Amino acid sequence: MSNDYPRPLLVRPHWQDLCGPWGFAADDEDRGLAGGWHGDPGPYTRTITVPYPPESELSGLRDTAPHPVVWYRRALSPDRLPGPGERLLLHFGAVDYRARVWVNGVYVGGHEGGHTPFSFDVTESLVPGEEQVIVVRAEDDCDDATQPRGKQDWRAEPHDIWYHRTTGIWQPVWTEVVPALHVKGLHWTPDVPGAAVTLEVELSRRPATPVDVHVVLSLGDEILADQTCRTERRDGRWVIALPAARHQMELARLLWSPERPTLLDARVELRQDGREIDAVTSYVGLRSVGVKDGRVLLNGQPRFLRLVLAQNYWPDSHLAAPADALRREVELAKELGFNGVRIHQKVEDPRFLAWCDRLGMLVWSEMPSAYEYAPRTVERLTREWLEVVARDRSHPSVVTWVPFNESWGVWHALYVPEQRHAMTALYHLTKAIDGTRPVISNDGWEHTESDIWGLHDYAPTGASIRERYADRDAVARVLSDRPPARRVALLGEPASPGRPVVLSEIGGLSLKPASDESWHGYAAFGTAGELAEEFRQMVEAVLDSVELAGFCWTQLTDTEQETNGLLTAGREPKLPVETVRRILTRPARSTPAEAIDAARRAARQED
């Protein structure tokens, strides 16, 4: 795994990576709790490499059989034990689906939700002078369709567009020693017109006496803000002024965008009685996102979206990224000419989002779906979705929230009011937590309320796309009575007409598979040249529309039997990279500023 700190928006210099060999045991009959496996080393007869799921090759097991309960055990000598006034925190990036954790036989806590992080203060469970033993029980029932699982298959073998399951630990496990009173959480909200950012700080507990939160924001050697805020509470919220951003002619150099992903370095110190008791580093991207007059806006300017559908799934490690793969995935998408990724049915490792922040890549963040509608489904989705938004809302690269996809889990929304209410409720709940980004109630079709109307249209040819979306009247017909995929595009009367229309899934083209090859796609071609020509025609049909605000191409890489990527599963291009890039980066008719920028770039190159 990469040595990047697992929580890039709240970083401390000293931490211990617990990824690597752990003891492992499957508990198919669920006897471990009654049998005391949390204190017995005997059952752990197999070794797994964490954080790779047991179904994957890199885990060392390649065990694809369904196991509703699995156990992990690790004995270790911490690099450092907490001293007086310090605590030891145990962190998990993600454990699918329900986790319970013991340290030295003492239960320290549990968590439900397979895609979001959790932590425990394990100080009181430590045994001085001895190895510390961590045990994790993970429960992941593949037959429970109310459980958010995304593209993980419930069948024994992958089929159609679903892939191998990811059971148990699949993101980093790590520890850090912290002061008893420490910074537990940070959030940044940029305000470009106000030349400021709002800082939210959560402390580990309420301080006994007032504490100072000292904030420094900088760009290289330039100090942009140096502010001290006092609080007696466990949490605080302050506006940090950025005087340099008030200057109209200086603002551009401070803004974050895919072309210029400027990040402001942040240091947050916790001081009590003039003494520093904790310090963390972070970063801020100063940018705004919005929608207006059928366009998506970035920093107040229309931005045509050239997204690619990213499953972020690797042949040897499945949903867990192998070493250095997170950065490379972003680089590959940028090299092809995309300006954004739609992370599909997965909550990606926050280090991936950090690379999108650093390298300049827009992100649509999507909640993995459940497949049965019930009150329990709504409870689970809501709880975990709030954790996703809390974890990721400070990343400047994240520009859109998508709680539902293609009515998965709310399949009868057209006829069942409760299901429509669920979509609308999560839309409004997300807007209540974060009002700075567009939210899509249900990407693909059957929108209740959405800031962007995302449509999934696997039209067979570029000519079909050109006909359907040529002008305003054509798009209106699609939205009203000729929707793609035979699903109604909009449910009821949209609260705000004139939303941007984005073809958030198109393409799905592939080379013809071998006769004995398992395959799923939407069209197959005999040669790379034929594939390139249809790719060009489809993309140009979108770029020629004066009404469309962008598209998302299916997909970046081949994934299991879904071999319709621009890259193979091994991340090798099927078409010349320059060919793809030239097609993708042609200016869009709906965004005249793109043509002006392209002309300026060409003139500079000639000079």
Image (cartoon, grey):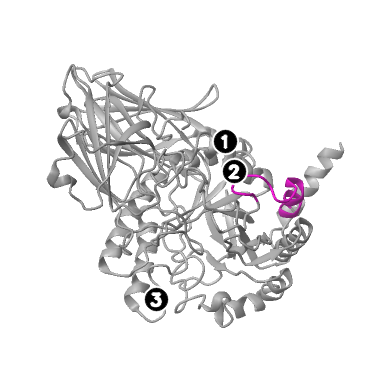
**Which residue is identified by label 3?**
413
Image spot of residue 598 (x, y percent): 77, 48
Instruction: In this rendered view, identify the residue nearer to me: 497 or 587.
Output: 587
Residue type marked 1: Thr
Tell me, yes or no, whether the highlighted magenta stretch contains residue 35: no
Q: Can residue 54 be seen here?
A: yes
Image-based side of 432 in relation to 342, left or right: left
Could you tell me which residue is drawn at 32 percent across and 62 percent down?
Answer: 143
C-alpha distance separating marks 3 and 1: 42 Å
Is residue 195 visible in the rendered image? The answer is no
On residue 262, the disc is 1
Could you tell me which residue is drawn at 39 percent across and 50 percent down? 166
**Range shown magenta:** 567-585
Instruction: Return the disc, 1 or 2, that comes first in the chain's sequence.
Output: 2
Magenta span has 578?
A: yes
How many residues crowd mark 1 within 10 Å: few (<14), some (14–19), many (20+)? many
Q: Amino acid at mark 2?
A: Ser
* Horizontal relation, residue 458 to residue 574: left or right: left
Which marked residue is nearer to the observer: mark 3 or mark 1?
A: 3
User: The C terminus lies in which quarter of the figure?
Assistant: top right
Closer to the chain start, of discs 3 and 2, is 2
> In this image, 72 relative to 562: left or right?
left
Determine the image quadrant of residue 329.
top right
Left/right placement of residue 144 relative to residue 478 reads left
Q: Secondary structure at mark 1?
A: loop
Are the two marked residues, 1 and 2, in contact with CB atoms closer than 8 angstroms?
A: yes
Image location of residue 232, percent across then percent down: 21, 33
Mark closest to the chain's N terminus, 3 or 1: 1
The disc label shown at residue 195, or none: none
Q: Which corner quadrant of the image does residue 87 belong to? A: top left
- Inspect the image, locate mark 3, and give the three-letter code of the amino acid beneath it: Ala
Q: Which mark is residue 257?
A: 2
